[in-house]
Image (cartoon, rainbow, N blue to C red):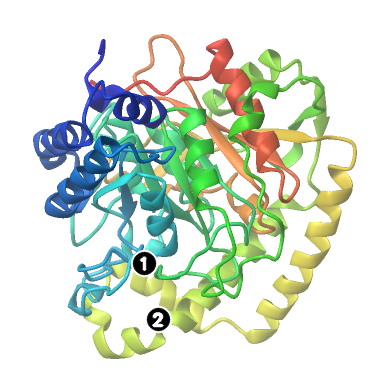
Amino acid sequence: MNLPTQDLPAAEIAAAVKSGAVSAREVVTAALSRIEARNGALGAFTDVTAARALAKADAIDAARAKGEALGALAGAPFAAKNLFDIAGLPTRAGSKINRDLPPAKQDATLVERLEAAGAVLVGGLNMGEYAYDFTGENAHDGPSRNPHDPGHMSGGSSGGSGTAIASGMVPLALGSDTNGSIRVPSSLCGIFSLKPTYGRLSRARTFPFVASFDHLGPFARSVTDLALAYDAMLGPDASDPALADVAPNPLAASLALGAEGLRIARLGGYFAKTGEPAAFAAVERIAKALDAQRIVEFPQAERARASGYLITMAEGAALHLDRLRRRGADFDPDVRDRLIAGAMLPGAWIVKAQKFRSWFRSAVGEAMKDVDIVLAPATPCRAPRLGQKTMVLDGQEMLVRPNLGLFTQPISFIGLPVATVPVWTDGERLPIGVQIIAAPWREDLVLRVARALEAQGVVKAPIAR
């Protein structure tokens, strides 16, 4: 093999394992070695499940020796944000409090489904406390650092997922996205990600944040890997009452269709201001590659973001009230204070925000009536420095922690599917991402466009060295 297995995408690892060019044990051993070598400096993993991973690898090798069919992800290592249940470990959700919980008895549904497709779980990943974070800085476990420049943020709250992929520790990772927690790390770490439509993938046996916004999805260094992981995780699950009753849409086979014939536009208005020039230049670069000349607007997107904030604060506070009363001193103070503020919001404000949510969903549907895909920045800037509290956007000094989600929150508000793709500028060490957004249930379209851009070389996800 020309590259170490740690550097290969999951699809190529699986092909090599199936052909016998490499054993699953060799792949997993190499991944564990890289985690041991790099994690101490980067803070991606909070738990490494080495014994479990090697046992799974041996089972894959035994199955191959017997001539049994292997799954699409056979032997590919993956890791999961530590709000996913992992049998035998307490589900931390980035907190100090949760690590006192009994170990999980069963894996989360999506972990089970990836392993059923042959992927091998190697551990749990660092994250912002209770997923209320955009920075990747954890007060209890330390920050997950940006592998392209460890003095900078990975983004959050799925920061460990972004770090693990960008550093080459694993080719696949799972994260969650409430207001942008998949897309922000994807943008800052320079990798691919998919936030599916709200209700598309099961959330069973994961620790929630805001039930009406929470999504789960994959990170990878290739679009094909995203599609394979997505396909493996599809399907009904009675354990998640929010899972939509819609037919699964496996899409790996459709990637080759590319962007041909799709109507693609840029988002203007709110999505074309309050960001660094690099954010808008990235969108322009993608738009040029796709010949997307049209501009559309999502009306009152700023109000959508504000309404999403209110609902997030109120639902998050309701979830954590008992913990706030019993163990307030054990929270990250920044998280605790925002949850307490959420508990004091007037109920009438939340009712009004939910009514606006319905209006905004209809308005966006109307705006997208004549387009298949819209493009927007994923973050307003490249990765800030660790510990940085403020940044200047359009001449305004703004707080870093909430405003990294400026462009992701209005999209989460109505649960649209989004692929985030990484854009690199010559001479810049840090990347920035672009959101590829479609109508509900059209994950196939966002990944087709992402794959077309990857094939052209417009976007890429190199391993940080």
What's the CA distance linking mark 2 and mark 1? 9 Å
The answer to whether residue 234 is above or below residue 258 is: below
Please name the residue shown 69% across and 20% down the image: 287
Rendered image: mark on residue 320: 2
> Are there few (<14), some (14-19), or many (20+) residues within 10 Å of tag 1?
many
Q: Residue 74: where, in percent of width, then height?
A: 35, 38
The answer to whether residue 197 is above or below residue 307 is: above
54 relative position to 265: left or right? left
Q: Residue 423: where, in percent of width, then height?
A: 50, 22
| Quadrant where the image shows the C terminus | top left
Q: Residue 446: where, in percent of width, then height?
A: 65, 35
Q: Are marks 2 and 1 in contact (CB under 8 Å)?
A: yes
Front residue of this view, candidates 8 and 96: 8
* Mark 1: amino acid: Tyr
Please name the residue shown 13% across and 36% down the image: 29
Rendered image: mark on residue 162: none
Q: Secondary structure at mark 1?
A: helix
Please name the residue shown 84% across and 35% down the image: 371
* Mark 2: amino acid: His
Front residue of this view, candidates 434 and 308: 434
